[in-house]
């Protein structure tokens, strides 16, 4: 079983800075994205620190069995928290959605509202849940509360890397199958590209880099309201 991968990021058409970061390391078999939180100082620094720390921590892991993703993610959280204490009294944060491939399995960890999608047999599945106020309310089956919130309040994050106490981490471990395609992306892509279009584009027979370029072009044609970043894996 082999993995081909690609990564691409774009500032979009509205934002003055790109606060997205990615990791795409075939040697470590580590893949993911981080989206620095806007509205707080140091979003880009938080995202960069998260992916750099994650890469260093994974490089130091012993080989063999599946990694402890919760412990690993909490280590990243501590480093981002420490940086915030130095440069941002208001705090700083980032999303982090990543996976490590071990023994023909995808080991996935997720905090925030970046996403991981899987295309298998033509069917697109979202493997992550957005950690937002809106989703938390819906999970409690209290949709009436949404009427009292504006759009910004609904989309506010309830978990991020950099928070205190450390966030709950969603994890998932699943076997890989030849033909699988996995997309890690920030919301500059998933908020701009509908799932039917996303499934069709991911299912194309082109190279991963070309597909990512098409996704980002689609997002920019839709207004390019946010930074757009993707990491794409082909399992063969």
Image (cartoon, rainbow, N blue to C red):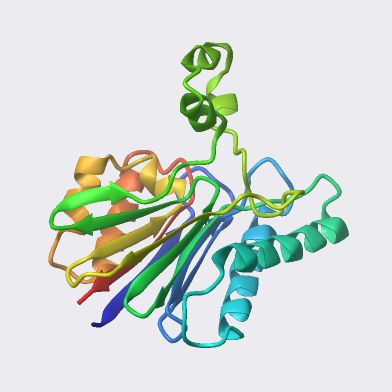
Q: Is residue 150 above or below residue 85?
A: above
Say whether residue 48 is visible: no
Q: Is residue 191 left or right of residue 73?
A: left
Front residue of 211/12: it is 211
Q: Image quadrant for the C terminus?
A: bottom left
Question: Is the residue 77 above or below the residue 208 in the image?
Answer: above
Answer with left or right where residue 98 lies relative to residue 220. right
Residue toward you, 199 or 20: 199
**Residue placed at 13% from the left, 54% from the top?**
122
Q: Position of residue 221 (x, y in %)?
A: 31, 43
**Residue 113 left/right relative to 224:** right
User: Of all residues shown, which one is farthest toward the front?
Assistant: 65
Q: Considering depth in this image, is 211 or 236 the residue closer to the camera? A: 236
> Which quadrant of the figure has residue 69?
bottom right
Q: Is residue 223 above or below residue 176?
A: above
What x and y, as percent, mark residue 117?
33, 54
Q: Is residue 11 left or right of residue 19?
A: left
Picture quarter with the N terminus = bottom left
Residue 83 position within the rendered picture, expressed as x and y whole percent measured from the top left: 79, 62
Can the viewer see residue 55 in this picture?
Answer: yes
Q: Residue at x 47, y 29 (%)?
A: 139
- Residue name at image x 35 percent, y 40 percent: 192
| Location of residue 95 in the rendering, given as x and y in whole percent from the top left corner | 57, 52
Q: Residue at x 17, y 50 (%)?
A: 123
Which quarter of the picture shows residue 155? top right
How many marks the image carries: the answer is: 0
């Amino acid at each position: 079983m082999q993995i081909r991968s690609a990564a691409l990021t774009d500032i979009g058409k509205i934002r003055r800075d790109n606060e997205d970061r990615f990791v795409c390391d075939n040697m470590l078999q580590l893949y993911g994205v981080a989206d620095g939180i806007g509205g707080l100082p140091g979003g880009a620094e938080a995202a960069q620190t998260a992916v750099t720390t994650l890469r260093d921590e994974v490089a130091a892991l012993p080989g063999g069995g599946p990694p402890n993703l919760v412990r690993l993610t909490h280590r990243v959280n501590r480093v981002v928290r420490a940086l915030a204490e130095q440069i941002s009294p208001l705090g700083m944060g980032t999303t982090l959605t990543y996976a490590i491939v071990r023994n023909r399995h995808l080991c996935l960890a997720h905090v925030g509202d970046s996403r991981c999608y899987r295309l298998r047999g033509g069917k697109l599945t979202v493997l992550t849940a957005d950690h937002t106020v809106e989703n938390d309310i819906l999970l409690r089956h209290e949709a009436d509360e949404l009427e009292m919130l504006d759009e910004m309040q609904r989309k506010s994050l309830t978990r991020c890397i950099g928070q205190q106490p450390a966030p709950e981490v969603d994890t998932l471990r699943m076997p890989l199958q030849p033909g699988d395609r996995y997309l890690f992306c920030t919301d500059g892509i998933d908020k701009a590209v509908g799932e039917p279009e996303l499934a069709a584009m991911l299912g194309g027979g082109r190279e991963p880099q070309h597909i990512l370029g098409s996704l980002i072009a689609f997002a920019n044609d839709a207004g390019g309201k946010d930074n757009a970043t993707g990491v794409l894996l082909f399992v063969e």
